[in-house]
């Protein structure tokens, strides 16, 4: 329970830091620029992958993301999937070698 509380504090601190480091929005303009009015708007991007997009994080924010990933089990899941891929590749290679030897 204590670890969960510590992780929650870390995640909340990361959110606060990311909100504080966000650049301020420019003040609104009274009249839009002529080039901005005439330019066509680009089409909306196609639907991407189901996984959330991650911004490049450095320093403290990266450490907080790593801690959150570890706490939620994402790091362990990623390691397990990589291990399974490696084992499957070794098995496939071994099966190919056996098939070639039997021919």
Image: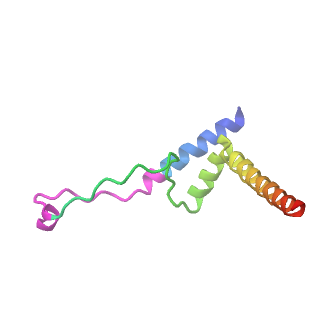
Of residue 56 and residue 21, the one placed in the foreground of this image is: 56
Vertical placement of 88 versus 9: above or below? below
Residue at 59%, 41% (x, y): give it.
9
31 displayed left or right of 68: left
Of residue 18 and residue 77, the one placed in the foreground of this image is: 77
Total of numbered circles in the picture?
A: 0
Residue extending furthest toward the right:
102
The overriding secondary structure of the stretch rendered in magenta is loop
Magenta stretch contains residue 31: yes
Residue at 54%, 49% (x, y): give it.
14
Residue 83 location (% of width, % of height): 76, 52
Residue at 37%, 59% (x, y): give it.
23
Residue at 82%, 54% (x, y): give it.
91
Give the magenta part as a residue range.
Answer: 18-38
Of residue 76 and residue 4, the one placed in the foreground of this image is: 76
- Can you tell which quarter of the image residue 98 is in? bottom right
Residue 88 location (% of width, % of height): 77, 53
84 displayed left or right of 71: right
Residue 22 location (% of width, % of height): 40, 56
- Can you tell which quarter of the image residue 72 is in? top right
């Amino acid at each position: 329970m204590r670890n969960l509380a510590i992780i929650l504090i870390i995640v909340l601190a990361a959110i606060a830091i990311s909100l504080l480091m966000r650049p301020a929005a420019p003040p609104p303009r009274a009249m839009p620029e002529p080039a901005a009015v005439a330019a066509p708007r680009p089409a909306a991007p196609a639907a991407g992958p189901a996984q959330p997009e991650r911004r490049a994080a450095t320093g403290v924010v990266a450490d907080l993301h790593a801690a959150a990933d570890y706490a939620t089990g994402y790091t362990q899941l990623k390691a397990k999937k990589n291990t399974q891929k490696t084992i499957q590749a070794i098995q496939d290679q071994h099966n190919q070698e056996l098939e070639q030897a039997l021919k």
